[in-house]
Image (cartoon, rainbow, N blue to C red):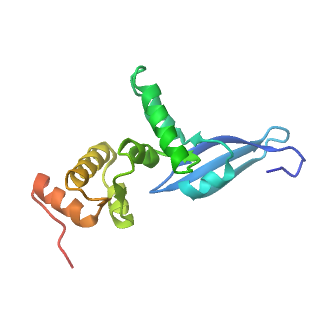
């Protein structure tokens, strides 16, 4: 992409937004103009010719112990290469770590996004583990309700 001043835009940052949305920031080094693009993480790959990590995925990777980080990075990047994915988000990291075995139904993903942050990561791990243990390929709202009932003794009333 080129700016009106004739210079090319440079990639600045890639942020994960709600659900599967990402926000890409570009800037022009010559005139300082900034440009933002919002899209889903799979379509964002069309804007890159190499593999890029979202800020959140990179942060998660950076928090790993130094002896584990290269192993996880290689595993995730190999998975992304096999699936022709150019943007590694936290969701892609999870898919890669689960060997692509568990996906999320869009309604379940929306419900997960409404769970408070400190509990969300634990809920995600438990739901994906339960789905894998049962041989399910997808986390559904029904599974979420079942787990919620088992651990908290409550379920959302059906309408």
Look at 28% across and 51% down and name the residue there.
128
Tally of numbered discs: 0
In the image shown, does 78 or 143 lie closer to the viewer? 78
Expressed as whole percent of the image width and height from the top left, the position of residue 20 reads 48, 56
Residue 122 position by quadrant: top left
Look at 71% across and 45% down and name the residue there.
26
Q: Residue furthest right?
A: 6
In the image shown, does 93 or 34 lie closer to the viewer? 93
Expressed as whole percent of the image width and height from the top left, the position of residue 10 reads 74, 41
Position above or below: 156 against 55: below
Expressed as whole percent of the image width and height from the top left, the position of residue 1 reads 79, 51
Q: Is 118 positioned to the left or the right of 8 in the image?
A: left
In the image shown, does 14 or 134 lie closer to the viewer? 134
Q: Report if residue 54 is visible in the image.
A: yes
Look at 43% across and 32% down and name the residue there.
72
In the image shown, does 30 or 61 lie closer to the viewer? 61
Expressed as whole percent of the image width and height from the top left, the position of residue 125 reads 28, 45
Q: Which residue lies furthest to the top in this view?
A: 67
Q: Residue furthest bottom?
A: 159
For the C terminus, the quadrant is: bottom left
Q: Report if residue 40 is visible in the image.
A: no
């Amino acid at each position: 992409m080129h700016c009106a001043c004739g210079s090319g835009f440079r990639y600045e940052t890639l942020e994960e937004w709600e659900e599967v949305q990402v926000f890409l920031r570009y800037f022009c080094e010559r005139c300082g103009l900034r440009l933002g693009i919002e899209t889903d993480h799979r379509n964002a790959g069309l804007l890159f010719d190499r593999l890029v990590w979202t800020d959140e995925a990179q942060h998660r990777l950076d928090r790993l112990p130094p002896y584990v980080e290269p192993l996880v990075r290689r595993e995730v990047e190999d998975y992304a290469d096999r699936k022709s994915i150019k943007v590694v988000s936290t969701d892609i990291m999870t898919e890669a770590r689960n060997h692509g075995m568990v996906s999320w139904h869009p309604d379940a993903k929306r419900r997960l996004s409404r769970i408070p942050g400190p509990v969300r990561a634990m809920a995600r791990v438990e739901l994906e583990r339960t789905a894998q243990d049962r041989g399910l390929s997808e986390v559904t709202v029904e599974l979420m309700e079942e787990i919620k009932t088992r651990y908290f003794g409550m379920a959302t009333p059906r309408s």
